[in-house]
Image (spheres, rainbow, N blue to C red):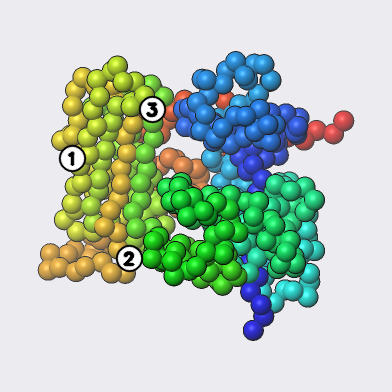
Amino acid sequence: MPEPAIALIDCNNFYVSCERLFQPWLEGRPVVVLSNNDGCVVARSQEVRALGVKMGAPWFQLKDLARQHGIIAFSSNYTLYADISNRVMSVLADFSPQQEIYSIDECFLDLSGFKHLQYSDYGQHIRATIKQWIGLPVCVGIGASKTLAKLANHVAKKRAEYAGVCDFTSLPMAVRERLLAQIEVGAVWGVGARTVARLATLGIVSALDLQRAPPKAIRAQFGVMLERTVAELNGEACLTLEMIAPPRQQIMVSRSFGAAVYALEALQPAVTAYVTRAAEKLRRQSSLAGSVQIFIRTSPFKPDAAQYQGSLTVPLVAPTDDTRQLVCAAQAGLQRIYRPGFAYQKVGVVLLELIPEAQRPRTLFDDPAAQARASVLMRTLDSINTKMGSHCVRLLGEGSVGEGRGESGRMRRERVSQRYTTHLDEIAIVRAQ
């Protein structure tokens, strides 16, 4: 058996890098990407980090700083980011037979058995290929476990002498321990803020401290998950690669509105649109939902305004993936929790009690022919919308503006860039000089 070697490939400042990909003049300039409704910072270039801007900082509080330092802000362009991510992950899949896509900008590769290629050299080859083929900068961390690979990637990003690739498996133990001693324990994968505070009372403040902690004592005070983290820090792989993402146990779609919404009639199209999006995800993983939860709320950031939040779970007669049935349930729930006179800021839906489609329960009252027709209809809608663009064909209840939200509920995206790779009318044009 070859010695285990896991690589974590992480795109640097992914959202910002995607914007720079088609606008090279942004290189070296301070850039931020904003959340829905241009609310707060969700991505920062290194130049912005150097100015002390924190992740999640409200954009309206940064206006003066932006003018002073020329910070350039973009609205989130998730269509572009998702397409670039798919391209990156497709290229990375060629570097190992085992890949786990961890997030939109991260994936694990199993490099066990690749030692003859020299892991550091292979990591540099990965970086060069992604840069040349896609145009994005990435860093590579390599370790005997997923947790060590994460920390190696952290070192590759933070320390220029590693040139974007850090291989813990080839470093002398003294060097590896020195690096771990310089990493705060909160940077260890799976260690949250509350755990950090509790570990500090035991004198565990660095990744090295946690690595050296007695596993049984850690399990007694923090549970089996942190004990596994300790084992992973010591090179024992407890977290296997998940090459096929497990089905979600629940599916939620929610958005904040660009402007306050008061009327029930303005909330209803949004609910239809969100249920439609959730149902598409449900069918994509071949699942059925047994109930639908609907929630609405006012803005918690306006304490002087009247506050209200309501939520209701509506059970279904039988588990389904039919958008029409799910919408009916959600709209019935919305009718029950809606209260007039409030300025609603957010609405969302959650599909619950998910089961595999193959486990659909059968009853004496089933109509197989009707179920077959509904299944064909839903998959036809999904196929058309996949080929022709989201919301090309939709339920009448979604309306015709934005994502069915109406003018009052339209999401504010005043700084969004073009969808350079997915829409012909927005594709990048190159002209020879």
| Tag 1 secondary structure | helix
Name the amino acid, label 1.
Answer: Ala
- Nearer the viewer's eye, disc 3 or disc 1? 3
Contact between marks 3 and 2 (CB within 8 A): the answer is no
Q: In this view, does 188 lie to the left or right of 255?
A: right
Q: Is residue 239 left or right of residue 154?
A: left
Q: In which quarter of the image is the N terminus?
A: bottom right
Q: Farthest residue in the right direction? A: 433
Which residue is pictured at 75% across the width and 32% down the height? Answer: 28
Gap between marks 3 and 1 measured at Cα: 21 Å
Displayed quadrant of residue 262: top left
Q: Which mark is residue 416?
A: none
Which residue is pictured at 34% across the width and 61% down the height? Answer: 287
Residue under numbered circle 1: 332
Residue 63 lies, in percent from the top left, at 57, 18
Residue under numbered circle 3: 257
Q: Which of 233 and 134 is in front in this view?
A: 233
